Image (spheres, rainbow, N blue to C red):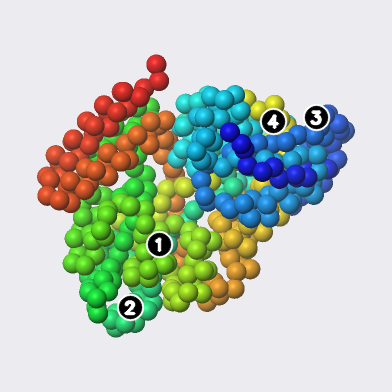
Amino acid sequence: MKPNKTITGLSMLAMITALAGCGGTNSGTGGVNGQSDAPGTPVVNTSPATLKVYVSNSSITDEDLNTLIVAPLKKKFPQISVEPIRQGKGTTIAELVAAGQPPDLIYTNNMDIGTYKMLDLLEDITPLMKKHQVNLERFDSAMLASAKSDKGELYGLPFFAHFSALYYNKNIFDKFGVPYPKDGMTWEDAIEVAKKVSRLDNGVEYRGLDPDTIARMAMPLSLTYVDSKTNRAVVNTDGWRTIFTTAKEIWSIPHNRPEKLNSFQARNWFMKDQTIAMLPYNNLLNIGLEEATKLGLNWDLAQYPSFKEKPNLYNHVDSQLFLIAKTSKYKDQAAQFLSVMSSDEVQMQSAKTTARLSSLKNPEMKKALGADMPFLKGKNLQSIFKSTSPTAPEFSQYNSLGRDLVFKSFEEYMNGKDLNTALREAEDKVNKRVEANAVK
Protein backbone atom coordinates (compact mmCIF):
# COMPACT_ATOMS: atom_id res chain seq x y z
CA MET A 1 0.00 0.00 0.00
CA LYS A 2 1.46 3.31 -1.02
CA PRO A 3 0.53 6.40 0.99
CA ASN A 4 -0.02 9.67 -0.82
CA LYS A 5 2.88 11.83 -1.80
CA THR A 6 4.55 13.53 1.13
CA ILE A 7 4.23 17.27 1.43
CA THR A 8 7.73 18.22 2.50
CA GLY A 9 9.14 21.14 4.32
CA LEU A 10 5.99 21.70 6.36
CA SER A 11 7.24 22.53 9.72
CA MET A 12 7.56 25.04 12.40
CA LEU A 13 10.25 27.28 13.91
CA ALA A 14 8.47 29.01 16.73
CA MET A 15 5.27 27.83 18.36
CA ILE A 16 2.07 29.88 18.07
CA THR A 17 1.07 30.71 21.60
CA ALA A 18 -2.41 30.34 22.90
CA LEU A 19 -4.53 33.33 21.96
CA ALA A 20 -6.14 35.39 24.64
CA GLY A 21 -9.91 35.35 24.94
CA CYS A 22 -10.09 38.74 23.20
CA GLY A 23 -8.44 37.23 20.12
CA GLY A 24 -4.92 38.65 20.44
CA THR A 25 -1.80 36.57 19.98
CA ASN A 26 1.46 36.32 21.84
CA SER A 27 4.63 35.00 20.31
CA GLY A 28 7.11 33.00 22.29
CA THR A 29 10.09 30.78 21.66
CA GLY A 30 10.13 27.49 23.48
CA GLY A 31 13.01 25.35 24.52
CA VAL A 32 14.31 22.30 22.75
CA ASN A 33 12.47 18.98 22.71
CA GLY A 34 9.47 19.95 24.81
CA GLN A 35 11.17 22.13 27.43
CA SER A 36 9.83 25.64 27.93
CA ASP A 37 12.31 28.48 28.32
CA ALA A 38 10.21 30.62 30.64
CA PRO A 39 6.85 30.73 32.44
CA GLY A 40 4.05 31.73 30.13
CA THR A 41 5.63 30.42 26.93
CA PRO A 42 4.31 27.32 25.20
CA VAL A 43 6.26 24.13 24.81
CA VAL A 44 7.89 23.73 21.40
CA ASN A 45 9.24 20.39 20.27
CA THR A 46 11.92 21.07 17.69
CA SER A 47 12.55 17.43 16.78
CA PRO A 48 11.96 16.65 13.10
CA ALA A 49 8.78 14.74 12.42
CA THR A 50 6.63 13.70 9.50
CA LEU A 51 2.98 13.73 10.52
CA LYS A 52 0.77 11.28 8.68
CA VAL A 53 -2.64 12.91 8.26
CA TYR A 54 -5.49 10.59 7.35
CA VAL A 55 -8.13 12.45 5.28
CA SER A 56 -11.39 10.54 5.49
CA ASN A 57 -13.60 12.68 3.24
CA SER A 58 -13.57 15.21 0.41
CA SER A 59 -14.51 18.31 2.39
CA ILE A 60 -10.95 19.59 2.09
CA THR A 61 -9.02 19.55 -1.18
CA ASP A 62 -5.27 19.08 -1.49
CA GLU A 63 -5.03 22.72 -2.55
CA ASP A 64 -6.87 23.93 0.54
CA LEU A 65 -4.84 21.65 2.79
CA ASN A 66 -1.63 23.10 1.37
CA THR A 67 -2.74 26.73 1.37
CA LEU A 68 -4.60 26.89 4.65
CA ILE A 69 -2.52 24.62 6.86
CA VAL A 70 0.68 23.33 5.28
CA ALA A 71 2.06 26.72 4.23
CA PRO A 72 1.42 28.41 7.63
CA LEU A 73 2.81 25.29 9.33
CA LYS A 74 5.99 25.53 7.29
CA LYS A 75 6.53 29.12 8.41
CA LYS A 76 6.07 28.34 12.09
CA PHE A 77 7.59 24.90 12.45
CA PRO A 78 9.89 24.00 9.52
CA GLN A 79 10.99 20.78 11.21
CA ILE A 80 7.57 19.21 10.68
CA SER A 81 6.50 17.61 7.41
CA VAL A 82 2.99 16.46 6.53
CA GLU A 83 2.10 13.29 4.64
CA PRO A 84 -1.61 13.24 3.70
CA ILE A 85 -3.19 9.82 3.21
CA ARG A 86 -6.62 9.95 1.62
CA GLN A 87 -9.17 7.25 2.28
CA GLY A 88 -9.37 4.84 -0.61
CA LYS A 89 -8.89 1.25 -1.64
CA GLY A 90 -6.11 -0.11 0.53
CA THR A 91 -6.02 3.03 2.67
CA THR A 92 -9.11 2.82 4.82
CA ILE A 93 -8.45 3.54 8.47
CA ALA A 94 -9.08 -0.11 9.35
CA GLU A 95 -6.56 -1.26 6.75
CA LEU A 96 -3.93 1.20 7.96
CA VAL A 97 -4.37 0.07 11.56
CA ALA A 98 -4.27 -3.60 10.59
CA ALA A 99 -1.03 -2.96 8.67
CA GLY A 100 0.54 -1.31 11.71
CA GLN A 101 0.56 2.09 10.00
CA PRO A 102 -1.93 4.22 11.94
CA PRO A 103 -1.82 7.95 11.19
CA ASP A 104 -0.79 10.69 13.58
CA LEU A 105 -3.77 12.90 12.80
CA ILE A 106 -7.23 12.09 11.48
CA TYR A 107 -9.35 14.54 9.50
CA THR A 108 -12.98 13.50 9.81
CA ASN A 109 -16.54 14.51 10.55
CA ASN A 110 -17.81 14.56 14.13
CA MET A 111 -20.47 11.98 13.18
CA ASP A 112 -17.72 9.45 12.46
CA ILE A 113 -15.85 9.69 15.77
CA GLY A 114 -17.32 6.35 16.81
CA THR A 115 -15.37 4.58 14.06
CA TYR A 116 -12.06 5.73 15.52
CA LYS A 117 -13.14 4.99 19.09
CA MET A 118 -13.99 1.45 18.02
CA LEU A 119 -10.43 1.10 16.67
CA ASP A 120 -9.08 2.43 19.98
CA LEU A 121 -7.33 5.34 18.29
CA LEU A 122 -8.55 8.16 20.53
CA GLU A 123 -7.71 9.55 23.96
CA ASP A 124 -8.31 12.76 25.88
CA ILE A 125 -5.92 15.43 24.55
CA THR A 126 -6.93 18.09 27.09
CA PRO A 127 -3.59 17.75 28.97
CA LEU A 128 -1.72 18.02 25.67
CA MET A 129 -3.61 21.19 24.72
CA LYS A 130 -2.85 22.64 28.16
CA LYS A 131 0.83 21.75 27.77
CA HIS A 132 0.93 23.63 24.47
CA GLN A 133 -1.22 26.49 25.77
CA VAL A 134 -3.96 26.07 23.17
CA ASN A 135 -6.72 28.27 24.55
CA LEU A 136 -9.92 26.25 24.26
CA GLU A 137 -12.01 29.25 25.34
CA ARG A 138 -11.52 30.74 21.86
CA PHE A 139 -13.66 28.04 20.25
CA ASP A 140 -17.36 28.06 19.60
CA SER A 141 -18.64 25.94 22.49
CA ALA A 142 -20.97 23.77 20.39
CA MET A 143 -18.27 23.05 17.82
CA LEU A 144 -15.76 22.20 20.53
CA ALA A 145 -18.30 19.90 22.16
CA SER A 146 -18.58 18.01 18.87
CA ALA A 147 -14.98 16.87 19.36
CA LYS A 148 -15.70 15.47 22.83
CA SER A 149 -17.17 12.32 24.30
CA ASP A 150 -20.21 12.46 26.57
CA LYS A 151 -17.74 12.27 29.45
CA GLY A 152 -15.97 15.42 28.29
CA GLU A 153 -12.90 13.77 26.78
CA LEU A 154 -11.47 15.97 24.04
CA TYR A 155 -10.24 13.97 21.03
CA GLY A 156 -9.20 16.79 18.71
CA LEU A 157 -10.12 20.30 17.56
CA PRO A 158 -12.67 21.50 15.01
CA PHE A 159 -11.38 23.14 11.85
CA PHE A 160 -14.74 24.39 10.61
CA ALA A 161 -18.42 23.46 10.57
CA HIS A 162 -20.93 23.26 7.76
CA PHE A 163 -23.84 25.69 7.73
CA SER A 164 -27.02 24.99 5.80
CA ALA A 165 -28.93 27.21 3.39
CA LEU A 166 -31.73 27.05 0.83
CA TYR A 167 -30.07 27.48 -2.57
CA TYR A 168 -32.40 28.36 -5.43
CA ASN A 169 -32.20 28.67 -9.20
CA LYS A 170 -33.48 32.14 -10.12
CA ASN A 171 -33.86 31.22 -13.78
CA ILE A 172 -36.46 28.55 -12.98
CA PHE A 173 -38.47 30.93 -10.83
CA ASP A 174 -38.25 33.62 -13.51
CA LYS A 175 -39.26 31.15 -16.22
CA PHE A 176 -42.51 30.29 -14.45
CA GLY A 177 -43.19 33.72 -12.94
CA VAL A 178 -42.99 32.53 -9.34
CA PRO A 179 -41.58 34.77 -6.54
CA TYR A 180 -38.22 33.73 -5.10
CA PRO A 181 -38.04 31.85 -1.77
CA LYS A 182 -37.86 34.01 1.35
CA ASP A 183 -36.02 33.80 4.65
CA GLY A 184 -38.01 32.32 7.52
CA MET A 185 -39.87 29.64 5.56
CA THR A 186 -40.99 26.39 7.17
CA TRP A 187 -40.85 23.08 5.33
CA GLU A 188 -44.57 23.49 4.71
CA ASP A 189 -43.93 26.86 3.07
CA ALA A 190 -41.17 25.41 0.90
CA ILE A 191 -43.45 22.57 -0.19
CA GLU A 192 -46.12 25.03 -1.33
CA VAL A 193 -43.52 26.97 -3.34
CA ALA A 194 -42.24 23.73 -4.84
CA LYS A 195 -45.70 22.85 -6.13
CA LYS A 196 -45.65 26.01 -8.25
CA VAL A 197 -42.39 25.26 -10.07
CA SER A 198 -42.44 21.45 -10.35
CA ARG A 199 -43.49 20.74 -13.91
CA LEU A 200 -42.61 19.25 -17.27
CA ASP A 201 -41.80 21.98 -19.80
CA ASN A 202 -40.67 21.34 -23.37
CA GLY A 203 -39.48 17.87 -22.45
CA VAL A 204 -37.52 19.07 -19.39
CA GLU A 205 -38.67 18.07 -15.92
CA TYR A 206 -38.09 20.86 -13.42
CA ARG A 207 -38.26 19.70 -9.83
CA GLY A 208 -39.20 22.30 -7.26
CA LEU A 209 -37.54 20.97 -4.10
CA ASP A 210 -35.03 18.22 -3.41
CA PRO A 211 -33.85 17.73 0.22
CA ASP A 212 -31.14 15.33 -1.03
CA THR A 213 -31.64 12.60 1.59
CA ILE A 214 -33.75 11.94 4.65
CA ALA A 215 -30.46 11.77 6.58
CA ARG A 216 -29.84 15.44 5.81
CA MET A 217 -33.42 16.36 6.66
CA ALA A 218 -33.06 14.63 10.05
CA MET A 219 -30.11 16.74 11.18
CA PRO A 220 -32.09 19.74 12.55
CA LEU A 221 -33.91 17.27 14.83
CA SER A 222 -30.58 15.74 15.92
CA LEU A 223 -31.78 12.25 15.06
CA THR A 224 -29.55 9.18 14.99
CA TYR A 225 -30.08 5.56 14.00
CA VAL A 226 -28.48 3.98 17.08
CA ASP A 227 -28.46 5.25 20.66
CA SER A 228 -24.93 5.98 21.85
CA LYS A 229 -25.47 4.68 25.39
CA THR A 230 -27.47 1.52 24.75
CA ASN A 231 -26.33 0.73 21.19
CA ARG A 232 -29.96 0.00 20.38
CA ALA A 233 -31.86 1.36 17.39
CA VAL A 234 -33.76 4.64 17.81
CA VAL A 235 -35.68 4.68 14.53
CA ASN A 236 -39.28 3.96 15.54
CA THR A 237 -39.68 7.45 17.01
CA ASP A 238 -41.78 10.57 16.55
CA GLY A 239 -38.76 12.37 15.11
CA TRP A 240 -38.29 9.85 12.31
CA ARG A 241 -42.08 9.86 11.71
CA THR A 242 -41.81 13.59 11.05
CA ILE A 243 -38.94 13.06 8.60
CA PHE A 244 -40.64 10.21 6.74
CA THR A 245 -43.95 12.06 6.35
CA THR A 246 -42.35 15.38 5.36
CA ALA A 247 -40.02 13.79 2.82
CA LYS A 248 -42.91 11.79 1.34
CA GLU A 249 -44.94 14.97 0.94
CA ILE A 250 -42.02 16.63 -0.87
CA TRP A 251 -41.28 13.75 -3.23
CA SER A 252 -44.98 13.12 -3.91
CA ILE A 253 -45.41 16.50 -5.62
CA PRO A 254 -46.10 15.81 -9.31
CA HIS A 255 -42.86 15.95 -11.34
CA ASN A 256 -40.78 16.26 -8.14
CA ARG A 257 -39.72 12.66 -7.47
CA PRO A 258 -36.17 11.79 -8.57
CA GLU A 259 -35.41 8.56 -10.38
CA LYS A 260 -33.64 7.29 -7.25
CA LEU A 261 -34.41 8.38 -3.71
CA ASN A 262 -31.66 9.25 -1.21
CA SER A 263 -28.99 9.06 -3.90
CA PHE A 264 -26.83 11.97 -2.66
CA GLN A 265 -27.00 13.44 -6.18
CA ALA A 266 -29.16 16.50 -5.52
CA ARG A 267 -26.29 18.96 -5.56
CA ASN A 268 -25.25 17.72 -9.02
CA TRP A 269 -28.80 18.07 -10.31
CA PHE A 270 -28.86 21.61 -8.95
CA MET A 271 -25.42 22.80 -10.08
CA LYS A 272 -24.75 20.76 -13.24
CA ASP A 273 -28.14 19.81 -14.67
CA GLN A 274 -29.71 23.02 -13.29
CA THR A 275 -33.16 21.41 -13.10
CA ILE A 276 -33.73 21.76 -9.34
CA ALA A 277 -35.46 24.97 -8.24
CA MET A 278 -34.67 24.73 -4.51
CA LEU A 279 -31.91 22.77 -2.79
CA PRO A 280 -31.72 22.73 1.04
CA TYR A 281 -28.09 21.76 1.55
CA ASN A 282 -24.92 22.46 3.49
CA ASN A 283 -22.09 24.76 2.41
CA LEU A 284 -21.70 24.68 -1.37
CA LEU A 285 -19.87 27.99 -1.58
CA ASN A 286 -16.52 26.22 -1.94
CA ILE A 287 -17.76 22.99 -3.52
CA GLY A 288 -18.58 23.56 -7.16
CA LEU A 289 -20.83 26.59 -6.96
CA GLU A 290 -18.32 28.99 -8.50
CA GLU A 291 -17.85 26.73 -11.52
CA ALA A 292 -21.62 26.29 -11.83
CA THR A 293 -21.99 30.07 -11.81
CA LYS A 294 -19.55 30.31 -14.73
CA LEU A 295 -21.67 27.73 -16.56
CA GLY A 296 -24.78 29.85 -16.25
CA LEU A 297 -26.37 28.95 -12.93
CA ASN A 298 -28.20 32.09 -11.78
CA TRP A 299 -28.60 31.42 -8.08
CA ASP A 300 -29.03 32.92 -4.67
CA LEU A 301 -29.76 31.59 -1.22
CA ALA A 302 -32.30 31.98 1.54
CA GLN A 303 -32.60 30.78 5.11
CA TYR A 304 -32.79 27.02 5.52
CA PRO A 305 -36.41 25.81 6.01
CA SER A 306 -37.39 25.06 9.61
CA PHE A 307 -39.68 22.54 11.20
CA LYS A 308 -42.51 24.43 12.88
CA GLU A 309 -41.62 23.06 16.31
CA LYS A 310 -37.92 23.93 15.79
CA PRO A 311 -37.85 27.45 14.28
CA ASN A 312 -34.61 28.93 12.94
CA LEU A 313 -32.62 25.72 13.27
CA TYR A 314 -30.64 24.05 10.51
CA ASN A 315 -28.43 20.97 10.75
CA HIS A 316 -27.00 19.97 14.11
CA VAL A 317 -23.33 20.84 14.52
CA ASP A 318 -21.64 19.23 11.52
CA SER A 319 -17.97 19.85 12.10
CA GLN A 320 -14.77 18.77 10.42
CA LEU A 321 -12.16 17.81 12.98
CA PHE A 322 -8.49 17.06 13.27
CA LEU A 323 -8.10 14.27 15.83
CA ILE A 324 -4.78 13.21 17.34
CA ALA A 325 -4.28 9.44 17.31
CA LYS A 326 -3.28 7.99 20.67
CA THR A 327 -0.77 5.76 18.85
CA SER A 328 1.19 8.70 17.44
CA LYS A 329 4.85 9.04 18.36
CA TYR A 330 4.69 12.74 17.58
CA LYS A 331 1.95 14.09 19.82
CA ASP A 332 3.79 17.33 20.59
CA GLN A 333 4.19 18.03 16.88
CA ALA A 334 0.56 17.08 16.29
CA ALA A 335 -0.41 19.62 18.95
CA GLN A 336 1.69 22.22 17.14
CA PHE A 337 -0.21 21.34 13.95
CA LEU A 338 -3.51 21.99 15.78
CA SER A 339 -2.23 25.29 17.14
CA VAL A 340 -1.55 26.53 13.61
CA MET A 341 -4.82 25.15 12.21
CA SER A 342 -6.80 26.99 14.89
CA SER A 343 -4.88 30.27 14.81
CA ASP A 344 -6.73 33.49 14.04
CA GLU A 345 -4.64 33.91 10.90
CA VAL A 346 -5.52 30.52 9.41
CA GLN A 347 -9.16 30.68 10.48
CA MET A 348 -9.58 34.16 8.96
CA GLN A 349 -7.92 33.10 5.71
CA SER A 350 -10.20 30.06 5.57
CA ALA A 351 -13.32 32.19 6.13
CA LYS A 352 -12.35 34.80 3.52
CA THR A 353 -11.04 32.58 0.75
CA THR A 354 -13.11 29.39 1.11
CA ALA A 355 -16.28 30.58 2.94
CA ARG A 356 -15.86 27.98 5.66
CA LEU A 357 -17.65 28.67 8.93
CA SER A 358 -14.87 29.15 11.47
CA SER A 359 -14.66 27.01 14.59
CA LEU A 360 -13.75 30.12 16.59
CA LYS A 361 -16.38 32.25 18.31
CA ASN A 362 -14.76 35.49 17.15
CA PRO A 363 -17.65 37.35 15.39
CA GLU A 364 -15.26 38.84 12.85
CA MET A 365 -14.95 35.39 11.28
CA LYS A 366 -18.64 35.41 10.32
CA LYS A 367 -18.40 38.91 8.91
CA ALA A 368 -15.48 37.80 6.71
CA LEU A 369 -17.30 34.78 5.22
CA GLY A 370 -16.45 34.66 1.51
CA ALA A 371 -15.03 38.18 1.50
CA ASP A 372 -12.30 37.27 -1.00
CA MET A 373 -14.60 35.28 -3.32
CA PRO A 374 -15.88 37.72 -5.98
CA PHE A 375 -18.64 35.44 -7.28
CA LEU A 376 -20.42 35.76 -3.91
CA LYS A 377 -20.80 39.52 -4.18
CA GLY A 378 -24.43 40.53 -3.80
CA LYS A 379 -25.58 37.13 -2.56
CA ASN A 380 -27.87 36.88 0.47
CA LEU A 381 -25.15 35.48 2.76
CA GLN A 382 -26.66 37.08 5.85
CA SER A 383 -29.52 34.57 5.63
CA ILE A 384 -27.07 31.87 6.75
CA PHE A 385 -26.79 33.42 10.20
CA LYS A 386 -30.54 33.66 10.80
CA SER A 387 -30.46 29.99 11.79
CA THR A 388 -28.28 28.21 14.31
CA SER A 389 -27.20 24.62 14.89
CA PRO A 390 -28.54 22.47 17.70
CA THR A 391 -25.89 20.58 19.63
CA ALA A 392 -24.78 17.45 17.86
CA PRO A 393 -25.98 14.22 19.44
CA GLU A 394 -23.55 11.65 20.76
CA PHE A 395 -23.03 9.12 17.97
CA SER A 396 -22.80 5.40 18.59
CA GLN A 397 -19.91 3.60 16.99
CA TYR A 398 -22.59 1.54 15.23
CA ASN A 399 -24.62 4.49 13.97
CA SER A 400 -23.49 4.17 10.35
CA LEU A 401 -24.87 0.62 10.23
CA GLY A 402 -28.42 1.96 10.26
CA ARG A 403 -28.52 4.41 7.39
CA ASP A 404 -29.08 2.16 4.39
CA LEU A 405 -31.68 0.13 6.28
CA VAL A 406 -33.64 3.27 7.15
CA PHE A 407 -33.32 4.50 3.56
CA LYS A 408 -34.75 1.18 2.34
CA SER A 409 -37.66 1.37 4.78
CA PHE A 410 -38.42 4.91 3.65
CA GLU A 411 -38.51 3.76 0.03
CA GLU A 412 -40.98 1.02 1.02
CA TYR A 413 -43.07 3.66 2.78
CA MET A 414 -43.00 5.86 -0.33
CA ASN A 415 -44.22 2.87 -2.32
CA GLY A 416 -47.20 2.24 -0.08
CA LYS A 417 -46.12 0.47 3.12
CA ASP A 418 -47.76 1.65 6.34
CA LEU A 419 -45.63 4.21 8.20
CA ASN A 420 -45.63 2.46 11.57
CA THR A 421 -44.83 -0.87 9.94
CA ALA A 422 -41.94 0.63 7.97
CA LEU A 423 -40.38 2.20 11.06
CA ARG A 424 -40.94 -0.85 13.27
CA GLU A 425 -39.35 -3.13 10.71
CA ALA A 426 -36.43 -0.71 10.22
CA GLU A 427 -35.78 -0.66 13.96
CA ASP A 428 -35.76 -4.45 14.11
CA LYS A 429 -33.35 -4.71 11.15
CA VAL A 430 -30.97 -2.12 12.64
CA ASN A 431 -30.89 -3.92 15.99
CA LYS A 432 -30.13 -7.23 14.32
CA ARG A 433 -27.30 -5.70 12.30
CA VAL A 434 -25.78 -4.04 15.36
CA GLU A 435 -25.94 -7.32 17.29
CA ALA A 436 -24.25 -9.13 14.41
CA ASN A 437 -21.43 -6.55 14.32
CA ALA A 438 -21.01 -5.95 18.05
CA VAL A 439 -17.47 -5.84 19.33
CA LYS A 440 -17.00 -8.82 21.61
Mark found first going from the N terminus, 2 or 1: 2
Instruction: Kindly identify which residue carries mark 2.
Output: 173
**Label 1: few (<14), some or many (≥20) within 10 Å?**
some
Mark found first going from the N terminus, 4 or 2: 2
Q: CA distance from mark 4 to mark 2?
A: 53 Å
**Label 3: few (<14), some or many (≥20) within 10 Å?**
some
Image spot of residue 420 (x, y percent): 15, 41
Query: In the picture, residue 126 is in which quadrant?
Result: top right
Q: Nearer the viewer, mark 3 or mark 1?
A: 1
Q: Which mark is residue 388?
A: none
Q: Nearer the viewer, mark 3 or mark 4?
A: 4
Check if mark 1's residue and mark 4's residue have beta carbons within 8 Å.
no
Residue at figure coordinates x 18%, y 35% from the top left: 425
Q: CA distance from mark 1 to mark 4?
A: 40 Å
Q: Secondary structure at mark 3?
A: helix
Q: Amino acid at mark 2?
A: Phe
Q: Nearer the viewer, mark 1 or mark 4?
A: 1
Image spot of residue 109 (x, y percent): 50, 43
Check if mark 4's residue and mark 2's residue have beta carbons within 8 Å.
no
Residue at figure coordinates x 38%, y 36% from the top left: 400
Q: Which mark is residue 34?
A: 3
Q: CA distance from mark 3 to mark 4?
A: 11 Å
Instruction: Kindly identify which residue carries mark 1.
Output: 268
Image spot of residue 402 (x, y percent): 32, 36
Q: Quadrant of the C terminus?
A: top left
Mark found first going from the N terminus, 3 or 1: 3
Mark found first going from the N terminus, 3 or 2: 3
Residue at figure coordinates x 50%, y 38% from the top left: 89
Check if mark 2's residue and mark 1's residue have beta carbons within 8 Å.
no
Q: Amino acid at mark 1?
A: Asn
In front of the other: 15 or 418: 418
In front of the other: 43 or 198: 198
